[in-house]
Amino acid sequence: MLAVFGSVSLDTIRTPGRVNAGILGGSAAYAAVAASRFAKTGLLGVTGSDFPARYERELARHVDLDGVERREGRTFRYDAEYDRHLESRTTRSVELGVNSGRRVRVPEGYRRSRFVYLATNDPAHNIGVLGDFDSPRLSMCDTIDHWIRTRRADVVRMVRRTDAVVINAEEARLLTREHDLIRCAKKMASWGATYVIIKKDAHGALLYHGGEVYPYPAFPTGRVVDPTGAGDSFAGAVMGYLASRGSTGLAAMRRAVAYGNVVGSITVEARGLRSLSGLARRDIEARMRRYGRLTRF
């Protein structure tokens, strides 16, 4: 089983000519639904008393919700706006709501999960939650600029505690205080991460392991509707594939990153979780075959 911990939110996403308010989102929601296309996935998170029942039903179609706690108060809310090219995103507001309270309790049934993904969240909470699991085979974390700017020491400590880190390129630079991405990866590896994956948005990703760098071009979708959650879906697909194979080796990780690129490219083609909700494994495999043909030479 794969366990995914992070935020479940109500998002307001502003793209050119359209505003989608109060839609289902959150780093853990995207990652868990993406991962569920490969392996049984349990979601860990917190929702408020205002969280719509229809969204709970939607998540329950894909993932186990025993790890989701409903608390009195407002659900985490995120408001962001994209530029006209859908390349730059500005965060307008973040309301932590019930996420600002005590950390989530890991159910007994989740504690033996062999794979654990810690999505973007308070790094201290992530470290505490990781300690509740019984020796997972592979744990991976992510972070965002907010936590790097306000809690950098905790983010570094989180990287030291996990086996792998997946991080956006600009946030990798901010965290390591380096500019070259290979130097960024080397520094995070020196902190203890066995695998470092740096997401480069529309430019693909790179994987660093054992002193070697493995570059991955992006899948050329040509149809970007909403980039929100693409990075979280990427990470969820990576962890889901590894869990499905029961492997933590380099060969499996290299293929997992390719799956991450493919699932991320599907996520951006519709608003919110719409692409992932209707996604079948055969659809992923079909695009994976295309990706293989495009990148083979």
Image (tube, rainbow, N blue to C red):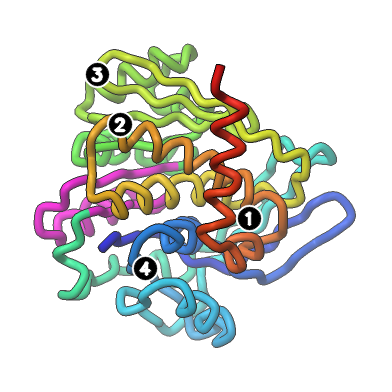
- Look at the image and tell me whether residue 44 can be seen: no
The region drawn magenta spans: 115-143
- Left or right of 272 on screen, residue 31: left
Relative to residue 222, is residue 141 drawn left or right?
Answer: left
Q: Position of residue 155 (x, y in %)?
A: 32, 38
Q: Earlier in the sequence, mark 1 or mark 4?
A: 4
Q: Secondary structure at mark 3?
A: loop
Residue occupied by mark 1: 93
Nearer the observer, 17 or 30: 30
Q: Residue 188 shows which numbered tag? A: none
**Does 235 sit above or below residue 171?**
below
Q: Quadrant of residue 41?
A: bottom left
In percent of width and height, residue 289 lies at: 56, 40
Question: Which residue corresponds to the image point at 77% horizontal and 38% vertical from the top-left?
Answer: 222
**CA gap, disc 1 and disc 4:** 25 Å
Of label 2 and label 1, which has the lower sequence position?
1
Q: Secondary structure at mark 2?
A: helix
Q: Amino acid at mark 3?
A: Gly
- Name the residue carrying label 2: 251
Looking at the rendered structure, the secondary structure element under dot 1 is strand
Amino acid beneath label 1: Ser
| Residue 117 is one of the magenta-drawn residues | yes
- Residue placed under numbered mark 4 in the picture: 43
Q: CA distance from mark 4 to mark 2?
A: 27 Å
Q: Nearer the viewer, mark 4 or mark 2?
A: 2
Q: Which residue is mark 3?
A: 210
Q: Residues within 10 Å of mark 4 (few under 14, many from 20)?
A: many
Residue 218 position in % (x across, y down): 60, 31
**Identity, as a three-letter code, of the amino acid under mark 2:** Ala
Mark 2 touches mark 3? (CB < 8 Å) = no
